[in-house]
């Protein structure tokens, strides 16, 4: 509980009273002839006779500051100050358009008018970026600087007549650089999963998956999650060897591709980008092993034909 007392006597005018913060109890004693005691249970009191509530403005200092710690390597001091220019529509009491400051794409502070901060950097080249946003749009300005070769380590942040932020150094606005971003190109990654590793012989369901085969599919899911920024499509194609009828092999290849798809979806891969198909025995990678007559040796020779191909199209990290 905070008590604030104001004592008024013949030598103290009302105009000289100071602003007082009141949290729970305000006691005011007036004149030697009489005592008036007011007890008010309030969080804040604003009195018309010059007693104002003490509230701290959220705009008096920058927020979200980084790069503040000075070390043996980070020994180059940089001082930033935002001037008094406001964005259109802002007032000193209501600032919706702070200037965001970035160092090498890392946000290093929000600056309101007349805010300042000091940074400790290495004496090397950095990209400084300032950005602000209104309800209509965001604007920014990038500058590459070698802070070890500056004639002045003091920078001023401001906005121009269009509301775009900029940086000044040594009294001169720095030219914003146009950053041409090259559109990332999609890549295709292909993985062959051996059917003999995936499934029991002639198997195709989740129950037919072998432990090693299940792990291989999980590895593909992990690769998709960890190595891609985005994935536009995943094509799964089941393949068989030449043994058996066309209809049997076409269905076997389809079932195996569907099973791999289901396991990928179970492990967080988006199902809407996955397609499945069967090539049956139509796309062998062996020569058919026609010179091998013994059944088990023939199955072993044709093993590379029994597979599920995974083709991932997306933007890699």
Image (spheres, grey):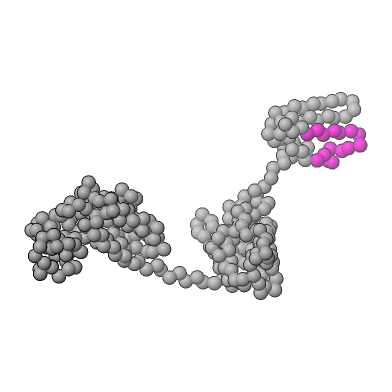
Residue at 62% of width from left, 56% of height from top?
Answer: 65
Give the number of marks.
0
| Quadrant of the drawing holding the C terminus | bottom left
- Whether residue 94 sits left or right of residue 20 in the image: it is left
- Image quadrant assignment for residue 159: bottom right
Rendered position, 209 above or below 3: below
Q: Which of the pair 282/20 is nearer the observer?
A: 282
- Residue 257 percent coordinates (x, y): 22, 55
- Whether residue 283 sits left or right of residue 62 in the image: it is left
Residue at 17% of width from left, 53% of height from top?
Answer: 201
- Whether residue 261 sits left or right of residue 131 in the image: it is left
Q: Which of the pair 229/295 is nearer the observer?
A: 295
- Image quadrant assignment for residue 238: bottom left
Residue at 74% of width from left, 40% of height from top?
Answer: 52
Image: magenta residue range = 4-18
Q: Is residue 7 visible?
A: yes
Rendered position, 296 above or below 172: above
Residue at 23% of width from left, 48% of height from top?
Answer: 206
| Quadrant of the drawing holding the N terminus | top right
Q: Is residue 129 visible?
A: no
- Residue 66 percent coordinates (x, y): 61, 57
- Residue 184 percent coordinates (x, y): 40, 67
Asked whether residue 16 is drawn in magenta, I would say yes
Asked whether residue 216 is drawn in magenta, I would say no
Q: Which of the pair 232/180 is nearer the observer?
A: 232
- Residue 163 percent coordinates (x, y): 58, 62
Rendered position, 44 above or below 189: above
- Whether residue 85 sits left or right of residue 274 in the image: it is right
């Amino acid at each position: 509980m905070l008590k604030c007392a104001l004592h008024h006597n013949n030598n103290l005018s009302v105009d000289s009273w100071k602003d007082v913060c009141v949290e729970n109890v305000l006691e005011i004693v007036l004149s030697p002839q009489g005592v008036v005691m007011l007890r008010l249970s309030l969080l804040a009191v604003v009195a018309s006779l010059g007693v104002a509530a003490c509230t701290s403005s959220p705009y008096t200092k920058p927020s979200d500051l980084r790069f503040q710690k000075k070390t043996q390597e980070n020994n180059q001091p940089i001082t930033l100050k935002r001037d008094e220019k406001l964005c259109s529509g802002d007032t000193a009491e209501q600032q919706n358009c702070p200037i965001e400051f970035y160092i090498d794409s890392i946000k290093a502070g929000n600056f309101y008018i007349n805010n300042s901060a000091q940074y400790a950097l290495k004496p090397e080249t950095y990209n400084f970026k300032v950005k602000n946003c209104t309800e209509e749009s965001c604007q920014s300005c990038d500058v590459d600087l070698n802070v070890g070769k500056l004639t002045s380590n003091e920078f001023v942040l401001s906005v121009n007549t269009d509301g775009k932020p900029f940086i000044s150094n040594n009294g001169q606005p720095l030219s914003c650089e146009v950053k041409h971003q090259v559109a990332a190109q999609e890549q295709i990654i292909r993985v062959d999963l051996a059917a003999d590793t995936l499934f029991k012989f002639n198997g195709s369901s989740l129950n037919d998956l072998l432990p090693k085969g299940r792990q291989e599919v999980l590895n593909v899911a992990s690769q998709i999650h960890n190595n891609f920024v985005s994935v536009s499509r995943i094509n799964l194609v089941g393949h068989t060897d030449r043994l058996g009828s066309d209809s049997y092999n076409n269905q076997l290849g389809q079932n195996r591709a569907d099973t791999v798809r289901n396991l990928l979806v179970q492990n967080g891969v988006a199902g809407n980008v996955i397609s499945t198909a069967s090539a049956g025995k139509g796309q062998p990678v062996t020569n058919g092993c026609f010179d091998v007559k013994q059944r088990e040796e023939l199955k072993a020779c044709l093993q590379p034909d029994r597979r599920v191909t995974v083709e991932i199209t997306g933007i890699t990290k």
